[in-house]
Amino acid sequence: MTKAFVFGKFLPFHKGHEAMINFALSKCDFLTVLVCCSDKESVPDTFRKAWIENTFENRKNIEIRTFNYLESELPNTSETAESVSKIWADIFKKQFPDYSLLITSEEYGNFVAVFMNIQHIAFDIPKKLFPVSATAVRNDVFTNWEYLPDSVKPDLSVKIVILGTECTGKTTLTEKLAKYFNSSFVLEAGRDIIANSNSFTFDDLHLVATEHAKRIDKIILADNALVIIDTDIHTTKSYSRFTFEKELKISTNIYNSNKANLYLYLNNDVEYLQDGTRLSEVERNLLDLSHRQILTDHNIDIIEIKGDWDKRFEKAVEEINKLIATNGKKHWA
């Protein structure tokens, strides 16, 4: 029985890693993937382990382990150096005493294998099959989005939520921003499920919450890291409190699906247009206060968007560009 292992930081796990693991599985009877996590890295081992486990959940001959270490004791570097390889080879000997094969996509794999007295098989060291690296993804998640497996995308997507009370232009702004940034977008589920703001049940709000989360989860897997979302779970919870005077209980999964990187709140300082399905203007403005209180209760920081339609669009673009300018590095801060 041939037992092999691969190792890496997988920070983050990408399609190059996935291809290497698939290659390794073809060369052995049993494979261990060792996720090496230092005390200086902010992304927990649980995330990295889950990314790989979810990607290979249908494979039986693979296990994912984690190895946590202190950078004061072990080198955290990907340089090809015999001295570094010797240190890590000693660690791997203890981790894999009866393994006979190592697969890597790095030149240092040869050194490690020699020090362990086992075989090394290299996979795509020039990175021609998948011209990406974890460093490239960390530096620019937007450009490298296509190289991320579906298991990783929910954690690295960049979500912007457009909030506000009724008739403040949320849907129009969402679609306009999505077109401007060529991004994915999610329209609110509420308007499809509840046709009239003056007539709905408490159970309808549960349907809205579930459907909206499904829409977000689906669109995140599309070919764009940036997602513009029309309203979110806080709005649904606010309607519950405002209309029925009780709290809407939401599952952790639904709430996590709604979590965003930026919350833009549209002020109600625009002309009110009643189409027969909306609240009265007085109630609309009271709902605005309810929305804001819900956001305060959940410690959500908002950026206020005021003025006419053009000013709203310009301000939203400015704030989103600030977020994009970080190139997704907030994920690794």
Image (spheres, rainbow, N blue to C red):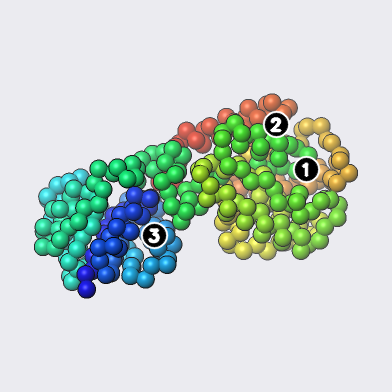
Name of the residue lying farthest toward the front: 26
Point out the tag, 1 or 2, that comes first from the N-terminus.
1
- Residue in the picture at 71% in, 54% down: 236
Q: Is residue 112 above or below residue 309?
A: below
Q: Residues within 10 Å of mark 3 (few under 14, many from 20)?
A: many
Amino acid type indicated by mark 3: Ile
Point out the tag, 3 or 2, that comes first from the N-terminus.
3
Amino acid type indicated by mark 2: Lys
Of circles 1 and 2, the one toward us is 1
Amino acid type indicated by mark 1: Glu
Residue 311 picture quarter = top right
Residue 264 lies left or right of residue 220; in this view the side is right
Disc 3 is placed on an element classified as: helix
Residue 129 picture location, percent across and down = 32, 45
Q: CA distance from mark 1 to mark 2?
A: 15 Å
Q: Residues within 10 Å of mark 2 (few under 14, many from 20)?
A: some
